[in-house]
Amino acid sequence: MPLTLFWLIVTLSLQSPNPLPTVENLISTLHPALYQEENIEDIHSASIIMDSHVDTMMNIINEDTWLPETDLGEETSLHIDIPKMQKGGLNAGFFAAYTTDYYGNNPRNISRTLALLNALYWTEQNNPDQFQIASTSREILSTIHEGKIAAIPTIEGAYSLEEHNAIELLHQYHDLGVKAIGFNWNYSNALGEGANRVYGDPGKTPSQGGLTELGADVAREMNKLGMVIDVSHMSENTFWDILEVTEAPVMATHSGINALKNHQRNLTDEQLKALAENGGVIGIVFYPVFLTNEPEAYVTDIADHIDYAVNLIGIDHVAIGSDFDGSDMPADIQDVTNLHKITDELVNRGYSSQDIQKILEKNTFRLLMEVEKAAAVRPYTSGLKITPEYEMGEMIDSRTPTLSATIEISAKSEIDESTISVIVDGISYSPDFDSESQVITLELKEALQERFHVVTFEAANINGDTERETRIFYIDN
């Protein structure tokens, strides 16, 4: 099938009210060998492989400046780099911007999250022929088809989202390509209670309850935007509240099975059944502490958790979410080059090639498509083009910068000047607009406290169609 026709099918399927075509039908148009079992000699090397949680970005930035300094295009000591991903067969990964709670310091939480997203863009910039940020199912498949690794931006720990900025900042994260957000990293926050059931202050103040009203609003907005709600690291109360609120499937991107290892980070049988009923997926984590009570874990322990989940909730709801570069690994998985051992173990346990491919990627991809299908926000053409003065990840030498962008207006469009705004770190401002030069200008009066920031320039035409351009920038200390 020609590639243009393939994308037409994908696009129409996401816009149509009819049921989605199967993931097998879509992916097989680009990878027919995967669906001819008799031609498969090595299931692993023939498969597309997706990992729903890797923490590599926090290991490539400088500990003091938070600027990226380790190029994944070269061989490193990390679990993941580009040569290792190519050797291990990892085609796509959820690259997490992990942020713990900086004790209620909202600007610092924002800065840390943006520093890690900036590191992902920097990695793409340094390796354009091998590594590409992809946020939609269409972009992911296109990237893989081009022979590149699809880097899917995600956030682990939404401590940057608070009452005063949550919805606007969420939209800015969406602009930056963020596809999934885990509300907590164990600590509780403004969105809901985390798995540890305490806040991140020095005294670790106990928390109670589940999802907050703000958390429910964020979850609904994520549904509208086609973003995946990640239920790993939530308390059980928050998990159940999320399932009451969401109208799209959710994912536990890196969790284990509580029946096999009793741990607050693992899902109970009741949670697993509810996850499946929701259409969701669990990515089985590789972290030994979540897998076994023994001093060391092995690939067989990962397969045991996969087995249990498959037997309880079915093959369509289980995936892999390694936690590479965010935790210790089993004794026989040193890094991503050892991924084939999971495939080998599943083959030894009698899994068919079709079922293995579901675990390795099809289930995760199906979930992404269904979340996009449920979204209310669709692409549109405004007839406006906004060009910010700064490139992604550019340095600015002032803590009270003047932020500007130029708007180009097509002959068939007309701008509604009342809609022009500039959003900085989730706070909306009314800028100056010179209609003759068509330049938007915002001069910040209050000094920015932290290093990394995000700015969005927004305007709409007279029909209400909105155009946005978003950039990360950082302050030169």
Image (cartoon, rainbow, N blue to C red):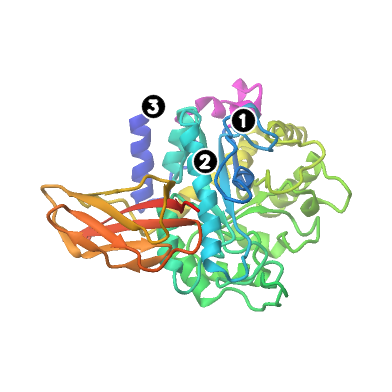
- Residue carrying label 2: 151
Disc 3 packing (10 Å; few <14; some 14–19; many ≥20): few
Instruction: Name the disc covering residue 89, or none.
Output: 1
Residue at 69% x, 38% y: name it.
79
Q: Please state which of residues 13 and 162 is positioned toward the viewer in this rendering.
A: 162
Q: Which residue is mark 3?
A: 1
Magenta stretch: includes residue 41: yes
**Helix, strand or loop status at disc 2:** strand
Q: Is residue 399 above or below residue 300?
A: below
Whether the residues at callouts 2 and 3 have beta carbons within 8 Å, the answer is: no
Which amino acid type corresponds to the residue marked 3 in the rendered image? Met
Cα separation, mark 2 vs mark 3, equals: 26 Å
Find residue 415 and report its horizontal and vertical position in percent: 16, 58
Pair 1/3: label in front: 1
Determine the main secondary structure of the stretch shown in magenta: helix
Q: Position of residue 342 (x, y in %)?
A: 72, 36
Which tag, 1 or 3, sits closer to the chain's start? 3
Q: Please name whichever residue, 76 or 475, is drawn nearer the observer in this view of the structure.
A: 475
Of tags 1 and 2, which is closer to the observer? 2
The reply, left or right, for residue 446 in relation to residue 406 is right
> Tag 1's secondary structure?
loop
Are dots 1 and 3 in contact, CB under 8 Å? no
- The residue carrying pointer 2 sits among few (fewer than 14), some (14 to 19) or many (20 or more) residues within 10 Å by Cα, namely many
Residue at image position (43%, 34%) is: 142
Specify the segment rendered in magenta.
25-47
x, y percentage for residue 271? 67, 63
